[in-house]
C-alpha cells in the first residue's frame, strides 16, 4: 500500500516539475508571424493584424437627432451634453465595499447614452437613457442595472423612447423638473 501512495506522490512531483519546466521553456514572444507580439488575456496575439475597424458614426441617426435637440435646448444655459460616457467615470465605489472590483468592472462595461454636465467644472447633473420600443430581456436587465446604479450614486435621470421623442418644449420641461435651468 505504501508503494502505491509513494508512487502516486512521485508521479505528482514529476508532473509538477514537468509543468514548471515547460512554462520556463515556452518561447515567449517567438512566433512564425511577423510583428510584435503582446499578451492580452493570457493569449498571445500579433499586434500587426488586430481585428479592429472604425465605426462611421458614434450614434444612430435617431440618437444623433435627439442629441442635437438637447444641444439646442441647452445652448443658452451653462450646460453641455456629451454622449457615450462610461458609467465608471461618473461614479465611485467606496474602498470598503464587498466585491468592489466586481462592481467596478460592471460599471466599466456600461456607457451612458447622454450626460448633461454643468459648466465650467463638467459636473455631471442629469443622465439621459435612450430606449428603443422593443428590447430584449438582456437589454432590459442591463438598463435596470444602469438605472439602479445611477440612482444609487444620487443622479437624476430621464428615459426617452428614441422612436417617439417628445417635442423640445416637453423635453425642456422635464429637464427643469430635474434641476436643469433652461
Image (spheres, rainbow, N blue to C red):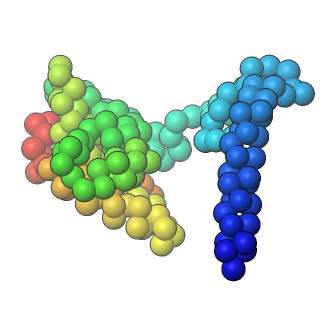
Q: Is residue 99 left or right of residue 94?
A: right
Q: Is residue 135 above or below residue 174?
A: below
- Taking depth in this image into account, of 78 and 149 the one nearest to the observer is 149
Across and down, in percent, residue 116 comes to 25, 37
Q: Quadrant of residue 36?
A: top right
* Residue at (42, 67) in percent of width and height: 140
* Residue at (49, 68) in percent of width and height: 138
Q: Hey, which residue is sitting farthest bottom in the picture?
A: 1
Across and down, in percent, residue 102 comes to 37, 53
* Residue at (73, 39) in percent of width and height: 21
| Residue 36 visible in this rendered orientation of the protein | yes
Q: Quadrant of residue 38?
A: top right
- Taking depth in this image into account, of 99 and 106 the one nearest to the observer is 99
| Residue 69 visible in this rendered orientation of the protein | no
Q: Quadrant of residue 122?
A: top left
Q: Is residue 174 above or below residue 2?
A: above
Q: Is residue 149 left or right of residue 138?
A: left
Looking at the rendered image, the quarter that the N terminus falls into is bottom right
Looking at the rendered image, the quarter that the C terminus falls into is top left
Across and down, in percent, residue 69 comes to 34, 39
Amino acid at each position: 500500500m505504501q508503494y502505491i501512495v509513494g508512487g502516486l506522490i512521485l508521479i505528482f512531483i514529476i508532473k509538477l516539475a514537468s509543468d514548471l519546466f515547460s512554462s520556463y521553456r515556452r518561447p515567449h514572444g517567438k512566433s512564425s508571424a511577423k510583428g510584435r507580439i503582446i499578451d492580452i488575456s493570457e493569449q498571445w496575439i500579433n499586434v500587426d493584424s488586430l481585428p479592429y475597424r472604425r465605426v462611421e458614426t458614434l450614434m444612430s441617426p435617431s440618437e444623433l437627432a435627439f442629441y442635437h435637440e438637447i444641444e439646442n435646448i441647452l445652448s443658452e444655459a451653462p450646460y453641455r451634453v456629451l454622449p457615450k460616457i462610461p458609467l465608471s467615470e461618473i461614479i465611485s465605489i467606496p474602498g470598503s465595499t464587498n466585491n468592489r472590483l466586481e462592481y467596478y468592472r460592471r460599471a466599466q462595461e456600461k456607457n451612458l447614452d447622454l450626460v448633461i454636465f454643468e459648466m465650467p467644472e463638467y459636473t455631471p447633473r442629469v443622465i439621459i437613457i435612450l430606449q428603443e420600443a422593443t428590447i430584449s430581456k438582456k437589454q432590459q436587465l442591463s438598463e435596470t442595472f444602469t438605472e439602479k446604479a445611477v440612482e444609487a450614486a444620487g443622479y437624476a435621470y430621464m428615459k426617452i423612447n428614441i422612436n417617439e421623442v417628445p417635442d423640445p418644449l416637453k423635453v425642456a420641461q422635464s429637464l427643469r423638473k430635474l434641476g436643469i435651468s433652461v
